Amino acid sequence: MRARGLFISFEGLDGSGKTTQMRRLAKRLRARGHVVLETVEPGGTEIGGKIRQVLLDAANQELSPTAELLLYFASRAQNVDERIGPALRRGEIVLADRFTDSTLVYQGCGRGLGAETVLALDRIAGRGLKPDLTLLLDIDVETSLARARARNAAQPAGETRMDEQSLEFHRKVYEAYQALAAGEPERIRRIDGRAAIEEIELAIWDMVSAHV
Ligand code: TYD
């Protein structure tokens, strides 16, 4: 797919502050007159929202790794066809709270399904769409789990199935993010997620304002 707009994704462990930073960036971009689509994976569309419920419901313990992988891509295919693709073709800026890099690290590496399988599905579901820029909010596993637990305690009926995975799973995900960032330093920019919110916001603005 030939995109005319600008596609920026946010990545990082749970609790890394992606969502807060994405909102702040959207606000700055809109203040500059840009049309911005904010989206989230899994989710982003009405159908994607239903798929999200299946994926994150802690009751679905028997969900198999392959079914999990396909559901993340089902949500993405719907989002790309219905929202992201059209917005980019209109020349808008798309901000995505997670995209295929999440699938590479959580399912490809965390679940051990392999990068090849993930990339093969991405060619179908994502139509080869790749973010122009990916902001990786870097926090360690312990901080991530502590923040996710605090968040889940505040929302008891929350979406906790992925957060409840083992420490080893989250360590694999962390390592996979580091490897991915090292392999594509031009696209994937690492940002210290433990810095103050305002400091991170400015660091992100420095990187993004060069592109808009
Ligand atoms: P969410 O509550 O949105 O977490 P966060 O705020 O940290 O993004 O839940 C999304 C969960 O789904 C998160 O644990 C990461 C996981 N995930 C995958 O395993 N594979 C994927 O392809 C995507 C998009 C998310």
Image (spheres, rainbow, N blue to C red):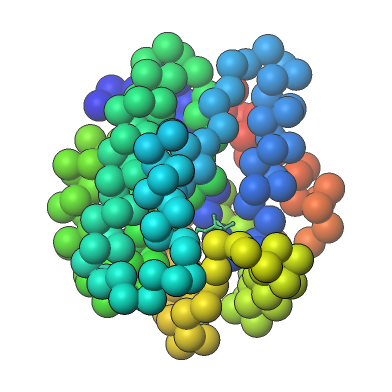
Occupied quadrant, residue 128 = top left
Residue 159 point in image, percent of width and height: 55, 62
Residue 208 as seen in the image, left or right of residue 194: left
Occupied quadrant, residue 83 = top left
- Is residue 174 shown to the viewer in this render? no
Who's the residue at 43% across and 20% down the image?
Answer: 87
Q: Nearer the viewer, residue 76 or 4?
A: 76
**Image height check: is 77 above or below 174?**
above
Who's the residue at 44% across and 34% down the image?
Answer: 46
Q: Nearer the viewer, residue 207 or 137?
A: 137
Residue 99 as seen in the image, left or right of residue 69: right
Q: Nearer the viewer, residue 6 or 142?
A: 142
Who's the residue at 35% across and 59% down the image?
Answer: 103
Residue 211 point in image, percent of width and height: 56, 28
Image label count:
0
**Image height check: is 83 above or below 147?**
above
Residue 188 point in image, percent of width and height: 48, 51
Residue 188 as seen in the image, left or right of residue 201: left
- Is residue 7 shown to the viewer in this render? yes
Who's the residue at 28% across and 38% down the image?
Answer: 77
Residue 27 point in image, percent of width and height: 73, 28
